[in-house]
């Protein structure tokens, strides 16, 4: 949503309602459907600003600015768009959207599916496996970079499963996760490469230099908490099954009405002309 919001100029419909993020999001969605041709699809939102992670750490994401009001006003319209495309939307108290998508991804993996998560959030890279991939936007709202296990190792020099161990030591400024003060990214990466995980590192502190050993011992609790905060939950009790996530034909009438309200003339024209039983996912350039 943020990428769609910031990638395009700010514009609004004839009633003055901001619509830039809705348009950018819709373009991204149509391109995704056309290019990836998924059999199943789902979208997740944060239910609120406070989750179980905030209960564990009052500082978690405390440095994050509030969502711009212009974007907040467009969230209901984005959800209307998803509803018109008949795409299931998930939100749940106490959990972040990351946890919901992580849980759905693991469900898909268990069903034998190849799962792709579209997100610019690097935290999702911890979920990458032989069946789960991450599509990270590269530029604006057009290009994406597919991360598999090999790409993650190439980019970060550690495996996907070690990302949370790395963050436990190095921290994550974007989420205000402290890690171990004095252990930067380079040192954290070297330690995880040598000891594989935070737990194994803590069991073998005697192998470290005196300075590093004392430093990590001083912040053991903080390192463990940092790993917990960085770990995406993949066991959220979501009431759904894979069949409910099957891609469906969008509701053309609802889309037409929505696009008309938003003054998306190009999209409105295309969907009005398409055949009733078949959606036409074209690359739309006209608003």
Image: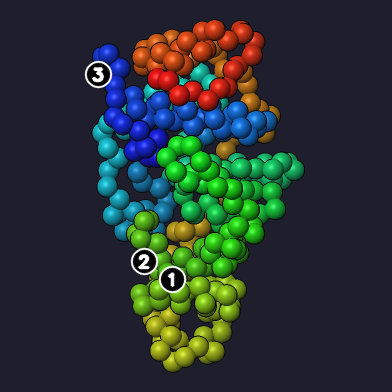
Question: Of label 2 and label 1, which has the lower sequence position?
Answer: 2
Q: CA distance from mark 2 to mark 1?
A: 12 Å
Viewer-nearest of labels 2 and 1?
1
Residue beneath disc 1: 185
Foreground residue among 89 and 133: 133
Residue at left 51%, top 46%?
136
Residue at left 47%, top 10%?
269
Q: CA distance from mark 2 to mark 3?
A: 42 Å
Residue beneath disc 3: 16
User: Percent position (x, y) of residue 160?
Assistant: 59, 60
Q: Are marks 2 and 1 in contact (CB under 8 Å)?
A: no
**What is the quadrant of residue 8 in the picture?**
top left
User: Percent position (x, y) of residue 146?
Assistant: 59, 48
Foreground residue among 260 and 124: 260
User: Percent position (x, y) of residue 149?
Assistant: 64, 57
Question: Of label 3 and label 1, which has the lower sequence position?
Answer: 3
């Amino acid at each position: 949503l943020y990428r769609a919001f910031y990638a395009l100029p700010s514009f609004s419909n004839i009633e003055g309602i901001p619509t830039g993020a809705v348009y950018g999001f819709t373009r991204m969605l149509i391109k995704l459907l056309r290019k990836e041709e998924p059999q199943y699809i789902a979208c997740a939102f944060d239910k609120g600003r406070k989750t179980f992670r905030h209960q564990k750490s009052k500082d978690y994401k405390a440095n994050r600015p509030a969502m711009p009001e212009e974007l907040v006003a467009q969230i209901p319209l984005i959800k209307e768009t998803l509803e018109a495309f008949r795409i299931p939307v998930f939100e749940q108290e106490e959990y972040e959207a990351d946890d919901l998508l992580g849980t759905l991804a693991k469900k898909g993996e268990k069903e034998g599916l190849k799962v792709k998560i579209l997100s610019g959030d690097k935290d999702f890279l911890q979920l990458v496996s032989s069946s789960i991939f991450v599509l990270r936007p590269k530029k604006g709202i057009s290009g994406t970079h597919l991360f598999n296990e090999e790409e993650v190792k190439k980019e970060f020099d550690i495996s996907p499963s070690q990302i949370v161990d790395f963050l436990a030591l190095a921290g994550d400024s974007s989420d205000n996760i402290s890690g171990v003060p004095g252990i930067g990214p380079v040192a954290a990466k070297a330690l995880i490469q040598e000891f594989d995980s935070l737990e194994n590192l803590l069991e073998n502190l005697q192998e470290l230099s005196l300075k590093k050993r004392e430093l990590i011992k001083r912040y053991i609790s903080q390192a463990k908490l940092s790993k917990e905060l960085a770990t995406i939950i993949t066991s959220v009790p979501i009431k759904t099954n894979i069949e409910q996530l099957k891609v469906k034909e969008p509701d053309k009438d609802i889309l037409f009405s929505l696009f008309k309200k938003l003054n998306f003339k190009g999209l409105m024209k295309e969907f009005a002309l398409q055949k009733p039983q078949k959606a036409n996912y074209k690359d739309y350039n006209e608003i």
